[in-house]
Structures are given as C-alpha cells and as structure tokens.
Image (cartoon, rainbow, N blue to C red):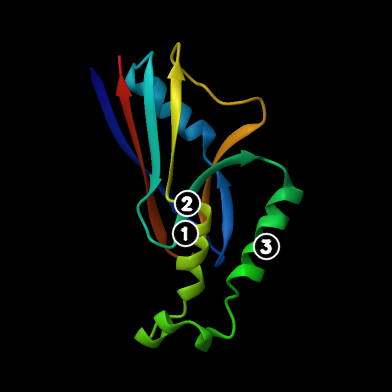
Amino acid sequence: MKSHREELWFHVKSRRGFVRITEDVRRAVAKSGVREGLVLVNAMHITASVFVNDDEPGLHEDYERWLEELAPHAPTTRWHHNRTGEDNGDAHLKRQIMGREVVVAITAGELDLGPWEQIFYGEFDGRRRKRVLVKVIGE
C-alpha cells in the first residue's frame, strides 16, 4: 500500500471565507501515484473546516448568512469561550457545523466526486496562516 502526506497552507485575509481546494487535492493524489484508494483532507485548526459542496456563489452567501444566524460573532460576550480573552467562540461552533474533514474515493487515479462536487476549505477565524492535511492511501 502507498501512502502520501502533504500540507496545504492558507492565509484568508478576512475573518471568514471559502477557498476551493479541489485542484490542490487532485495534485496531491497525482503526486502520490495512488490509483485506487482514499484521500483524507482535514483542517488542522479548530476554527477552520473542510467540506464538499457546489462551487456556486449564491450557496456560499447562503452559508455565510446561515452560519452567522446560527452562531453570530457579535456580541462576543454571548460566548463563554471568549472569557479566555479570545473573540472567536463563534468560529469554533461554525467549524463544528461545517465539519473537520472529508474522505474522497480515488478511482483510476482520479478523485471520485459527483458532477457538481468540489472540495472547500472554510475559514471562520482568519487573518493568519493555517494548514490542511492531505493524506492519500491506497494502491
């Protein structure tokens, strides 16, 4: 069995944002040489996410609105976590909703995604460098 590991680094300049990373993951799979297997893609920070969905701007706006309704940033005093001196309690909750990682099948050396599926990095407390782990395993 083959195994390949790499890290993707992101610096989202705003507090929140979504970055399509499908091509980055494809490159990692190609580099691995795995033809049949799985790729794990996970955010290595507790205020960031990796998820699969459509790359449609309206949907991204809907995510922004929906997440802010579920876990508003302000007032920051509403979140007990912020008593530690942080202001990102909402970002932890948003990450929990959107998920930590995705696992995608690799078939014939390609990501086995549905017709509209793309892989995204979701940032909920940006303005600093954060990483995503890509781990490819298979034959």
Residue drawn at 54 percent across, 63 percent down: 13
Amino acid carrying mark 3 in the image: Trp
Q: Position of residue 70 (x, y in %)?
A: 61, 68
Instruction: Estimate how packed mark 3 is, as few (under 14), some (14 to 19) or many (20 or more) residues with alpha carbons within 10 Å.
Output: few
Q: Is residue 125 visible?
A: no
Instruction: Estimate how packed mark 2 is, as few (under 14), some (14 to 19) or many (20 or more) residues with alpha carbons within 10 Å.
Output: some
Amino acid carrying mark 2 in the image: Gly
Please give left or right for residue 1 compared with residue 118 in the image. Answer: left
Q: Which residue is mark 3?
A: 66
Q: CA distance from mark 1 to mark 2?
A: 5 Å
- Determine whether the residue tagged by mark 2 lies in a helix, strand or loop: loop
Q: Which residue is mark 1?
A: 96
Mark sitting earlier along the chain (3/2):
3
Please give left or right for residue 4 compared with residue 58 in the image. Answer: left
Mark sitting earlier along the chain (3/1):
3
Task: Name the quarter where the N terminus is drawn.
Answer: top left
The reply to whether the C-beta atoms of the residues labelled 1 and 2 are less than 8 Å apart is: yes
Task: Name the quarter where the C terminus is drawn.
Answer: top left
